[in-house]
Image (tube, helix red, strand yellow):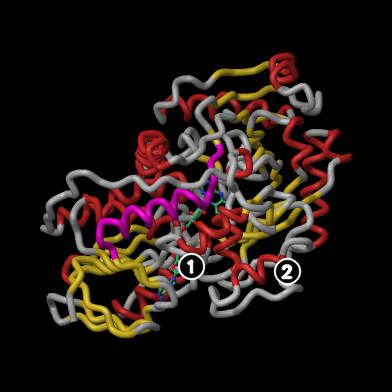
């Protein structure tokens, strides 16, 4: 059996970015994911904000990774055809007490190297966001905060890794493993795999993987749920800028933002729970989120809700990232990537590669990396249905074409389930939540998924 240089456990945002970085640096990579597709865990539900790090702890690994990740995303996104919705963000003070905190937030932003922040009076706010409630007293504008497509980049990273030889295995839960002093042999859902170094990117299960294979875990995952409400596309004209609250010690708070797909999102909540799997939504919380959104933009009261969802952050008992190197065991743990991981992922990957080099490893970097072109799903750029030859519109709510579905199903990393197809194309993600297109999608996907799609699976 061949021996990889590294086995990466978990294909969340962190594992995907690390698989790309290590492959481009010339390492022989195997990525082991227990789900049927990438982004099956914490990474499948987030706010999709590309953060500047203006409010991150100064001097922290988290801040460095966020800023490095932000810069690398900007540098590579055109070459991979990845979108950026340049919204900027306003941290809005709604009360006198919050107003008193804005000085401190501005000082922290400047200390973190974000020098283009500026204060807005209530009149400035109204000029920029005429639909925002006049109760907004003051704001700090952070022009560099943006919105991205939270799924396509990570598929692009895996496609790039695969094109340069990485082995990507879904349905491959790492169940056990033994280290012989040089090489790890991992028992997975698809058989044994061997690698010299293991990188634990198991997100919500990171502590359990360490405990099972290293015999000890230096942190404990405490899942923190975030619920969201998605407003219909009619809401997008009511808002340009991301509206952030004055953050608390524990959470960034409830955000109001446009999405790359032309909707408006309000959320997330921050609710501690024991369960690492169930991310349920509750009516009372959703009603409170809608009320909060309407307080901020009264005209939202006339806009329908398209969808609701929840995600689980892999938080731990401490706020910072839980990255550790176990040099004597050829093992690196990348845990506790709580609420900024999507932004930081490329920066985390750079950081982990440096740690790996410090363990004494060297490879010959790929000279001329290929750049897979991602299909564009963002509403502010040309969509597939706008160019000829698309065949048919399969999902009318999100204007998803037959060509897009066929390309997703026949690509080098086809979806392993309907969720993966939704994330690759947006089919079934619109107003009817798949009510009208599920039958056609069931026909088109017949034979592609282990659990076939059936009418009634919508929403
Ligand atoms: C509500 C919410 C809002 C957020 N908003 C933002 C935002 O706006 N901007 C931002 O930058 N970040 C945001 N984040 C943060 C970001 O989504 C997380 O930091 C990130 O998803 C964590 O990714 P991960 O790869 O560490 O974990 P995961 O996504 O959980 O990935 C771990 C993977 O490992 C797999 N796995 C687990 N155990 C095993 C095993 N034994 N064998 C094989 N595979 C295994 C799992 O199936 C999973 O796919 C948000 C998060 C949440 C929940």
Quadrant containing the C terminus in the rendered view: bottom right
Crowding at dot 2, Cα within 10 Å, few <14 / some 14-19 / many 20+, comes out as some
Residue 410: x, y in percent?
Answer: 47, 63
* Real-space CA distance between mark 1 and mark 2, rounded to the nearest whole angstrom: 22 Å
Q: Which residue is label 2 attached to?
A: 439
The secondary structure that dominates the magenta segment is: helix
Closer to the camera in the image, 70 or 326:
70
In this figure, which residue is indicated by the disc labeled 1?
37
- Above or below, 106 against 419 in this view is above
Q: Which of marks 1 and 2 is nearer the N terminus?
A: 1
Q: Say whether residue 406 is left or right of residue 72.
A: right
Quadrant of residue 216 within the rendered picture: bottom left
**Number of the front mark, 1 or 2:** 2
- Locate residue 76, reporting x and y percent: 36, 38
Closer to the camera in the image, 279 or 305: 305
Callout 2: helix, strand or loop? helix
Q: Within the magenta stretch, is there residue 54?
A: no
Q: Count every numbered label the image shows and give the total.
A: 2
Position above or below: 193 against 395: below
Start-end of magenta stretch = 147-166
User: Percent position (x, y) of residue 133?
Assistant: 80, 28
- Give 155 or 88, whichever is nearer the viewer: 155
Q: Is residue 15 above or below residue 354?
A: below
Q: Farthest right residue?
A: 302
Q: Position of residue 259 (x, y in %)?
A: 63, 41
- The residue positioned 73% from the left and 35% from the top of the image is 236
Residue 59 in sight from this viewpoint: no
User: As drawn, is 199 to the left or to the right of 343?
Assistant: left
């Amino acid at each position: 059996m061949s021996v990889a240089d590294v086995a990466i456990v978990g294909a969340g945002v962190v594992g995907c970015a690390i698989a790309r970085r290590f492959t481009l640096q010339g390492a022989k990579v195997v990525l082991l994911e227990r789900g049927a597709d990438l982004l099956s865990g914490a990474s499948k539900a987030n706010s999709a904000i590309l953060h500047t790090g203006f409010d991150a702890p100064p001097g922290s690994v988290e801040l460095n990774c966020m800023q490095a990740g932000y810069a690398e995303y900007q540098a590579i996104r055109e070459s991979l055809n990845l979108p950026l919705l340049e919204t900027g963000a306003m941290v809005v003070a709604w009360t006198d007490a919050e107003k008193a905190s804005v000085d401190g937030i501005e000082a922290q932003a400047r200390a973190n190297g974000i020098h283009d922040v500026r204060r807005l009076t209530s009149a400035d706010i109204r000029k920029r966001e005429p639909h925002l409630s006049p109760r907004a007293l003051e704001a700090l504008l952070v022009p560099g905060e943006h919105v991205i497509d939270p799924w396509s980049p990570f598929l692009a990273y895996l496609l790039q890794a695969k094109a340069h030889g990485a082995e990507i295995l879904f349905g491959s839960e790492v169940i056990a493993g033994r280290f012989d002093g040089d090489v790890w042999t991992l028992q997975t859902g698809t058989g044994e795999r061997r690698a010299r170094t293991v990188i634990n990117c198991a997100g919500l299960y990171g502590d359990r993987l360490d405990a099972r294979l290293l015999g000890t875990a230096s942190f404990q995952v405490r899942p923190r749920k975030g619920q969201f409400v998605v407003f219909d596309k009619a809401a997008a004209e009511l808002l340009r800028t991301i509206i952030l609250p004055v953050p608390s010690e524990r959470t960034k708070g409830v955000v109001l933002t446009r999405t790359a797909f032309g909707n408006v999102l309000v959320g997330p909540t921050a609710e501690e729970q024991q369960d690492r799997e169930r991310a349920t939504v509750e009516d009372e919380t959703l009603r409170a989120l809608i009320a909060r959104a309407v307080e901020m933009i009264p005209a939202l009261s006339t806009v329908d809700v398209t969808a609701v969802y929840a995600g689980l952050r892999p938080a731990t008992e401490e706020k910072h990232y839980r990255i550790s190197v176990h040099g004597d065991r050829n093992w690196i743990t990348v845990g506790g990537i709580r609420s900024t991981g999507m932004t930081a992922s490329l920066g985390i990957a750079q950081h982990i590669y440096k740690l790996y080099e410090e363990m004494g490893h060297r490879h010959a970097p790929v000279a001329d990396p290929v750049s897979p072109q991602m299909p564009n799903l963002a509403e502010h750029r040309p969509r597939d249905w706008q160019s000829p030859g698309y065949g048919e519109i399969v999902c009318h709510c999100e204007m998803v074409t037959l060509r897009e579905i066929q390309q997703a199903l026949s690509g080098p990393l086809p979806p392993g389930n309907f969720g993966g197809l939704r994330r690759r194309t947006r089919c079934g993600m619109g107003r009817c939540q798949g009510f009208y297109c599920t039958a056609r999608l069931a026909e088109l996907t017949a034979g592609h998924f282990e659990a076939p799609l059936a009418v009634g699976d919508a929403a």
